[in-house]
Amino acid sequence: MVNCFAGIDCGSVSINAVVIDGAGKLLYEAPYVRHSGCVDEKVRALLRELAGRFGPDSFQAVAFTGIHGQRLGEVFDAPFEVETVAQILGAVHVEPAVRTIISVGGQDTALFQLAAGNGSWNLESFAMNGPCASGTGSFIDQQAERLASSLYGRQVRPDQQQLQSILDDFIKLGLTSETPAPVACRCTVFTKSDMIHLQNKGEPLANIIAGLHYGNAANYVSTIVGNRTLISPQLLVGGMASNPLQVQAFRTYYPELRVPPHHTSLGALGAALQAVEQGWRNRPDADRLDGGAKGSGEASIPRAALLELKMTAFDSDNSLPPLNGSGDETVTVWLGMDVGSTTTKYALIDMEGTLVHKSYVPTRGKPIEVTRSLLTAMQKEIGERVSLAGISTTGSGRQVVGDFLGADLVIDEITA
């Protein structure tokens, strides 16, 4: 029986785990798993999988790290290592000569600069992002989900099971770009606004995706690196090191940057190595996560009663009565279009202001195409029964669609 030590990194997006022996040799690296907020369930399944693979009596210790690691350590009376230290320990183990570590995970970005040493490390400089998701993996995930309908050209409802395939297609498309669009990535709000503006101008989606990644790299260099000089060997670690487009963008600044083996699990490896070094001993029981254990999410997070709709009448039937007018008799109408960043809506009203027809569809980053298809469908359905008095547009795509339609009015969103 091999004496095993496990390290589990429970981050903001994923759970990563490794198993090593007492000499630090890697025996097993668990597949990268997104927990989708179900941390306890995923950790419980992971512990049972490790026990089944190696035998429950093989483990001398299990150590935790990551944003959820401290709570889990309390649940299991298990040791916890700060994720920054764990990442450095793991990186130095796979690349003893490393001098620079660029870490980009789901929530945090960081820079570690190490002094040269003989089998040991000394931290010379450290920098980390502030409380903003800009430049992190979770923001890239969010934008991939947001643009899913633009990617696939149909109405989709992205979920966590689909996310990895959506993200893969998102990156694959971005890699085809030869001219990344300018996207400011200092702030998530401004980044999204830039991307929406570029979409509504008709910029190819591949260029926008590439611009997002190159903007991330530029933002990291500006805000995290600053005036520091990065010495080789240089490593890129964390979940974003699995993104070839982001690696490509970073290498425009640091051509010698390498992605090391086990780059998503280096925090877990560092925690396991610390368990060996410090002589930690414990044997977590996965059943302790089955409801109400000390420090568990069930016990420590208060919950309010579910919201209920009591004082408002809500009619789920949102349909309109049939439009009057047939044959030679037509209804004079105004067409109003709201071309937003995610959805496009139109409304037809008669001269008394009564709503007579409407539609609501995803914009998909293609305001002109969506507008054309909406108007074509409207023409087929009611074209012979209405007489158009005028057109007005609003929304983030108001100008480009207004020019396309020759709209009588292009109205500012706030005014509308």
Image (spheres, rainbow, N blue to C red):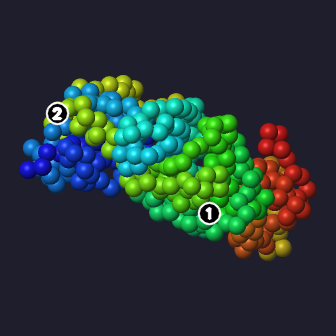
- Taking the spot 80% from the left edge, 50% from the top edge, the residue there is 394
Q: Amino acid at mark 2?
A: Asn
Residue 90 is marked as: none
Vertical placement of residue 321 versus 18, above or below: below
Residue 282 is marked as: 2
Give the left or right position of residue 185, taking residue 70 as reference: right
Q: Nearer the viewer, residue 152 or 13?
A: 13
Distance from the alpha carbon under mark 1 to that under mark 2: 46 Å
Q: Position of residue 52 (x, y in %)?
A: 14, 52
Residue 72 in view of the camera = no
Mark 2 closeness class: few <14, some 14–19, many ≥20 residues within 10 Å: some
- Taking the spot 74% from the left edge, 72% from the top edge, the residue there is 376
Q: Position of residue 258 (x, y in %)?
A: 50, 55
Q: Amino acid at mark 1?
A: Gly
Q: Nearer the viewer, residue 296 or 305?
A: 296
Give the left or right position of residue 196, taking residue 266 as reference: right
Q: Secondary structure at mark 1?
A: helix
Give the left or right position of residue 171, taking residue 55 as reference: right
- Taking the spot 19% from the left edge, 40% from the top edge, the residue there is 286
Tell me where residue 172 sits by quadrant. bottom right
Give the left or right position of residue 400, taking residue 316 as reference: right
Q: Nearer the viewer, mark 1 or mark 2?
A: 2
